[in-house]
Amino acid sequence: QLQLVESGGGLAQPGGSLRLSCAASGSIISINTMGWYRQVPGKQRELVATIISSGSTTYADSVKGRFTISRDNAKNTVHLQMNSLKSEDTAVYYCNADGLYGSSYYERRFFDSWGQGTQVTVSS
């Protein structure tokens, strides 16, 4: 059973910082892409940042220079350091990961999984 568990959300003041973490567990063989998305009520979920196994990253224009995504391949974890937070960063943040899972490499299957979401609120 694959599972992504997020942590680190909460309340921050404008200009402040928060760090989100996400741990993937289960019969994981390899993870290709890990990323963070966010969603506010009434809007579509949007990409925040992604990182592939080699360490290459992509960011939404709205967070470039403020957010940093990183991952620990040995621990199947991904982090999002959020600095200089703005009120418009308020959203539910979701972790996403895709890759291969199974009891053995020969019985591998592709997965694309989401975490349960963690609330980030930026307000004074």
Image (cartoon, rainbow, N blue to C red):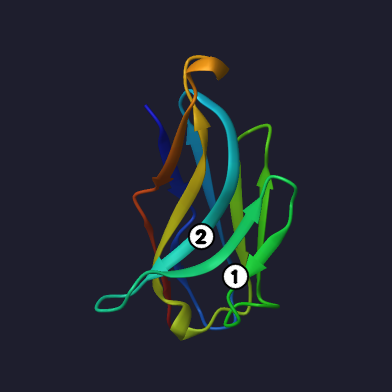
Give amino acid for label 2: Trp
Image: 33 above or below 107: below
For the point 63% across and 73% down, the residue is 83
> Looking at the picture, how far across and down is residue 105, in whole percent?
57, 18
Which residue is farthest front? 106
Residue picked out by circle 1: 17
Q: Looking at the figure, which quarter contains the N terminus?
A: top left
In this view, 97 is above or below 61: above
In the image as oriented, which residue stretches furthest toward the left? 42
Residue type indicated by callout 1: Ser
Under circle 2, the secondary element is strand
Q: Position of residue 74 (x, y in %)?
A: 68, 32
> Which of 2 and 67 lies nearest the eye of the viewer?
2
Examine the rendering and report whether any part of residue 39 can be seen: yes
Q: State whether residue 101 is above or below residue 41.
A: above
Question: Which of the two residues, 61 or 105, is positioned nearer the viewer here?
Answer: 105
Residue tagged by mark 2?
36
Mark 1: secondary structure: loop
Check residue 104 in the rendering and tell me which mark sits there, or answer none.
Answer: none
Q: Residue at x 52, y 84 (%)?
A: 86
Q: Are marks 1 and 2 in contact (CB under 8 Å)?
A: no
Quote the CA–CA distance across marks 1 and 2: 16 Å
**Residue positioned 70% across, 78% down in the render:** 65
